[in-house]
Image (cartoon, helix red, strand yellow):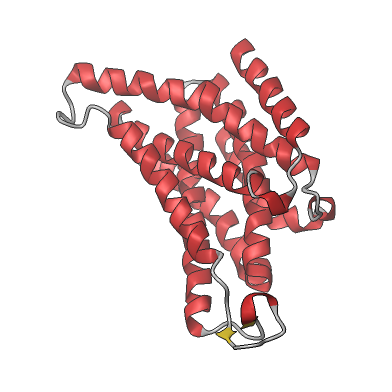
Amino acid sequence: MESLIAALGLGLLHAGASALRFLDRVPRSRWLSAAGGIALAYVFVHLLPELAKIQAAVNESGVLAGLERHTYLVALAGIVTFYVLENVARRPRGRPVEGAATSGGFLPDRPDRAAHAIGWIHLASYGLYNAIIGYVLVERQHVEDASLWPFAFAMGVHFLVNDHALRQHHGALYHRVGRWLVSAAVLSGWALGQVARLDEAALGLPLAFIAGGVILNVLKEELPADRQSRLLPFIGAAMAYAVVLLAV
């Protein structure tokens, strides 16, 4: 039941995050920078050490021989996946026109079919990512009750960062359809977790992918100079949540 409450809460965050207008500002909202710090602290203080334990157990059991670092390879795959998605989503949309009085010489009047398809691929990829997180919510409760809520909180603030980025990239498409898709994906992943369980070796795979995704998604939002990110809220939140995680 607790995992269902967490899944519903995460889904509602995506559905209603557009109402949080104070997040849409430059310099970047201190709340978004703090959210990124919290999510990153969870990955490095809690998730990566857990992956190390899982990997050690897998190595001792002899399962997946020849893939002694498979969890870290999946974490790398998570980073690469979201880097590719971000790179594609940031490409200019519209028709290139010489001398056009628009940024970069593009007319962004109507997205072409390719741009529209890219938008759907981007949203579907985040839907899959959210479904994995929804599934892991169930596993968190089964493995250790105390680990559910720190994970859910970290993913909740991470969702705020992702939601803000998706609204910037896809605008009306995300508001009309995309936010409902990624919200429903969390519940779909939770439902899958009710009927399918992973053993310890396999559980490391979704956890590793989430770790890689969080690292890339946080850094891509905080590092670009045009975002004018808030350094102190980012550092303060990361340190504070790291202390909390070490204490629980």
Number of disc labels: 0
- Give the residue furthest to the right: 22
Where in the figure is residue 110, as x and y percent of width and height? 62, 85
The answer to whether residue 12 is above or below residue 166 is above
The answer to whether residue 236 is above or below residue 202 is above
Given residues 60 and 214, the one toward you in this image is: 214
Where in the figure is residue 228, as x and y percent of width and height? 75, 47
Q: Which quadrant would residue 7 be assigned to in this image? A: top right
Residue 144 showing in the rendered view: yes
Given residues 226 and 28, the one toward you in this image is: 226
**Residue at image point 71% right, 33% down:** 234
Q: Is residue 203 left or right of residue 224?
A: left
Given residues 41 and 91, the one toward you in this image is: 91
- Give the residue furthest to the top: 247
The answer to whether residue 25 is above or below residue 243 is below
**Residue at image point 52% right, 58% down:** 86
**Residue at image point 48% right, 71% down:** 118
Which quadrant would the N terminus be assigned to in this image? top right
Residue 1 showing in the rendered view: no
The answer to whether residue 82 is above or below residue 76 is below
Q: Is residue 149 left or right of residue 61?
A: right
**Residue at image point 74% right, 35% down:** 231
Q: Which quadrant would residue 183 be assigned to in this image? A: bottom right
Where in the figure is residue 107, as x and y percent of width and height? 64, 84
Where in the figure is residue 200, as x and y percent of width and height? 32, 26
Which quadrant would the C terminus be assigned to in this image? top right
Given residues 218 and 208, the one toward you in this image is: 218
- Give the residue furthest to the front: 99
